[in-house]
Amino acid sequence: MALLQVSGLRRKKSRGNCGVARSLWIVRAGRALRARLGISHVSKKFSEVNRVRLVMRGGQVLLLLLLSSLCYGCASLEQLSDMDGGTREDHLSRTDSLLKIASDVEAQGDPSTAIKLYRDAVKSSGNAASANIRLGEACLHGNEIQEAIAAYRAALATEPANNEALLGLGAALVQNGALEEGLADLAKAAPQVGTGTAYNRLGVAQMMVGQFANAEKAFKVARRATPGDLDIATNLALAAALGGDEHRAR
């Protein structure tokens, strides 16, 4: 996890109001972080819940800075360039930081916060296809299917030939019940993406519409791409069983 350690800051034990002491410490920590990052002004939304988290490890105080509010509400790089005199390179760097932090937060099992960060990354990137794809994946995993569909379509609007976005859109459409439309997108995108995940998604969609033989073929390709994946192996056995091949299902 990407963590920023603030040197010289230690929480002092207080016999007074612990809540007040903690708040004062957070203010000091925030000032130190802003100075370290070269940020002269931060939106009031910076103080919202989930923007700064305290993590205690080995007696040291570490701050996980969630940078989503640094570029809050901006829809394009032109607008971002007007904020605080920053350059486009500065804001692209902040977008990259947002994406990395969102990925770390998602890996720690907090999908709702990760999705919020990915949304901010989309805004700060000027609606870039890559950021929309990351948002779509997070929403897909977080069962926010409608938002996932919207994110993938936004990515395709920017980059119509982006097969990662088409693959994600197909998977989201299948989960949303649009099996035929989703399967068509997956069948087109999976060979282009070529990963185990891509062919696994294709195979699942094919099983859902009763194409067991095609699903078995897709899972075999997925297994070759990702030999140790137990989910793919299980899906392959299930497709073989549903297709009537009990011998290959074992």
Image: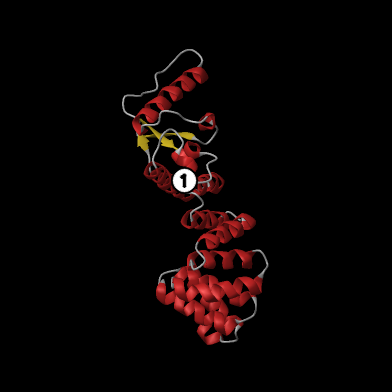
Give SS at disc 1: helix
Residue 37 vs residue 4, the one in the foreground: 37
Q: How many marks?
A: 1
Percent across and percent down for residue 9 are 35, 24
Is the residue marked by circle 1 packed among few (<14), some (14-19), or many (20+) residues within 10 Å? some
Residue 90 placement, left or right of 215:
left
Q: Please report the residue visible at 43 percent of the width from the left and 36 percent of the height from the top.
A: 65
Percent across and percent down for residue 158 are 52, 60
Residue 74 vs residue 20, the one in the foreground: 74
Q: Which residue is mark 1?
A: 77
In this view, which residue lies farthest toward the left? 7
Q: Quadrant of the N terminus?
A: top left
Q: Please report the residue visible at 37 percent of the width from the left and 26 percent of the height from the top.
A: 32
Q: Please report the residue visible at 44 percent of the width from the left and 75 percent of the height from the top.
A: 223
In this view, which residue lies farthest toward the right? 177
Quadrant of residue 25 in the image? top left
Percent across and percent down for residue 42 are 47, 30
Residue 38 vs residue 118, the one in the foreground: 38
- Tell me if I can see residue 66 in this picture: no
Rendered position, 109 above or below 244: above
Quadrant of residue 49 in the image? top right
Q: What's under tag 1, amino acid-wise?
A: Leu
Rendered position, 105 above or below 42: below
Percent across and percent down for residue 221 are 45, 78
